[in-house]
Amino acid sequence: MSFYSELNKSPWRGVISEVGIGLEFTAGLMGTKGVSNTVFCATCDYDRTNPVRKDIRKVSLEYVKEEASQNYCDAVTFTECFENHENFGLSISGAHYQDRRSHAWVAVTTARYDAYMHIELPRSYGDRRCQSRELSEAIQWFLSIALLKKNWMSLKVPRGVDVIYAPGISDVERLIMLRSDDLLAYQNGQFIRVIDALRSNRYVYPGSFNPPTKAHTHLPTELKSGVLYEISIAHHSKGNIAVEDLLHRIRMLNAVDKTVIISRASTFVEKHKVIKSYVSDGKHFVAGADVWNELVSEPGVVNDDRLSGTTFMICERGNYVVAPNRAYNNVEQYIFDHREYSDVNSSDARDRRILKFLDESVRKYISNHGLY
């Protein structure tokens, strides 16, 4: 049975509104037998006459949450004379862009809870028709969880979902949802739009951060602002990181006000490729001299043509210095003195419990959770 048919056979009754690329989902629902028992009103606000506040962007979380709430109130009014039903308000707001990227926010309000989702479909996900179809499938998946109470693990997780809050889905489970071709971004204890994190930061600092030390978090002055910390679930030499362990590392970085992006890109080539699918200009990478020297010792890793135009910001400290007289055709090197933290490393902080290497908030997190 299709999602639309299941919804129409359920006790849910509601009001729907969509702006932008939600039309395929709405058309699919409205064309299904029994929809008159489910949807009292469906609007497509292309003429921008909706009375919802004009001081918030149409394609935003604030907009869909407010409109979903209003739709719920309208649904309650419509169903005053009905029995044995539950009400919902649904709002979808999305946009196609000239660079062939699409994204949308979706929110649903009920008497007991609110839920919302964001989906980002980069240029590599096909033309507008393909993206509209993928969005429709994502909305069906989201509402299967939020309204029909299905276990998301029994469903195929759609591509492009980077923010989701719904009953019964924990932070650990959100990380499990991560697909090989997507990124997630985490800031101040919650998931945010990946593209917002990438746009507002100039540098990407990949690492394991197990745990994050002062050498990671107290960067040279030139790099202190605009740095995203990237952790890959898949490590090219150490194997995959367990999800629970990954969440601890993310939260430790958040404890020192760092924004984290999570990927499955284990090499710089893969990281560069996936980031460019979101922002065309890519990003500069930050690396310690020890990591850099390991990279350049492997044939083809740095001189790979797929890294053309990439800049590496390299932090030297103590005995970790950049090998002299090495030039690379396709990447630029900028070297920074980081000697203040020459004796700091994660292994000592983890294995020998040398806590002076750690920020106070990281120390407290480790103590409170019994790590290492």
Image (cartoon, rainbow, N blue to C red):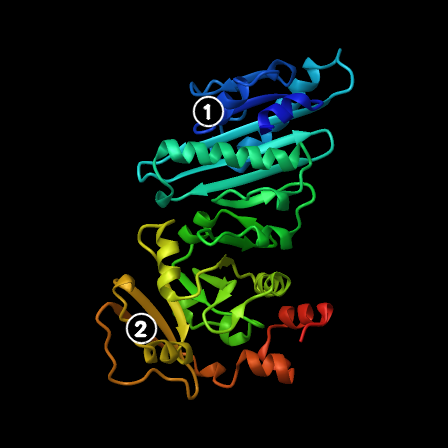
Q: CA distance from mark 1 to mark 2?
A: 48 Å
Please report the residue visible at 55 percent of the width from the left and 78 percent of the height from the top.
346
Residue 126 in view (yes/no): yes
Q: Which residue in the rendered view is the most extreme toward the bottom? A: 319
As displayed, is residue 162 above or below residue 323?
above
Look at the numbered discs 1 and 2 and tell me whether their residues touch, using CB distance below 8 Å.
no
As displayed, is residue 368 above or below residue 316?
above
Residue 67 in view (yes/no): no
Where residue 187 appears, as percent x and y from the top left, is 55, 54
Residue named by callout 2:
334
Who comes first in sequence, dot 1 or dot 2?
A: 1
Q: Secondary structure at mark 2?
A: strand
Where residue 141 appears, as percent x and y from the top left, is 57, 36
Q: Secondary structure at mark 1?
A: helix
- Residue 107 is tagged as none
Residue named by callout 1:
23
